[in-house]
Structure formats: C-alpha cells, structure tokens
Image: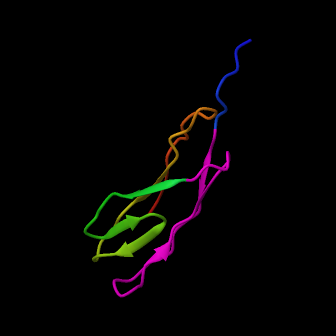
Amino acid sequence: MTVDKAPQRITFNALPVMTYTETPFSVTATVSSGLTATYDSSNASVAIISGDQAMIKGVGTAMITAFQAGDSNHLPAEPAQQY
C-alpha cells in the first residue's frame, strides 16, 4: 500500500495599513494541517519579521509572505501573500 502526503493550504487575511510610528504587531496565517506558518518580508527597509511579529522600519511597501514547508505527513503549502 502507498500512502501519499496530505496537501495543506494557508489562509492569510489582509494586513492593516500601518504608519511608521506603529509598534510591532502580530501576523497570523492559519495552516489547514495545523502546522505553524513562517513569515518573510519582501522589503526589510519597510518591515522585518521576527517569528510572528512584524516591525515597521520605514516608509514604503512590503509584501509579507506566509510559508509552510510541510513535514513527513504533509506536502509544502503554496505560499500566501499580503501587503
């Protein structure tokens, strides 16, 4: 018998519009498998990510991407992005 890895999906709701003076805020994506998402910023001069916290570093636009690489039972999820 062959058992395939299960697919998984990331749900990542829209992020609020922030201003330069904002304090760090949580980014939260839900992974259908229950595994934990990781995050990355497309522009570290605007926002950096540490764990599930985003910190505003400057004015501009940054896309935040949620990832889930999979495990021994789950395929990698398609990344989800929000501005």
Q: Residue drawn 45% across and 57% down?
A: 39
Magenta portion: prevailing SS class: loop
Residue 51, picture quadrant: bottom left
- Up the image or down, 21 lies above or below 35; here it is below
Q: Is residue 18 above or below residue 43?
A: below
The residue lying toward the viewer, choosing from 81 and 76, is 76
Answer left or right for 30 relative to 68: right
Image quadrant holding the N terminus, namely top right
Residue at far top of view: 1
- Bounds of the magenta span? 8-36
Q: Nearer the viewer, residue 43 or 60?
A: 43
Tell me residue 64's x, y (percent): 42, 60
Is residue 83 part of the magenta span, yes or no? no
| Pick the front one: 49 or 81 | 49
Vertical comparison of 50 with 2: above or below = below
User: Could you tell me how many numbered marks the image carries?
Assistant: 0
Residue depicted at x 33% and y 57%: 42
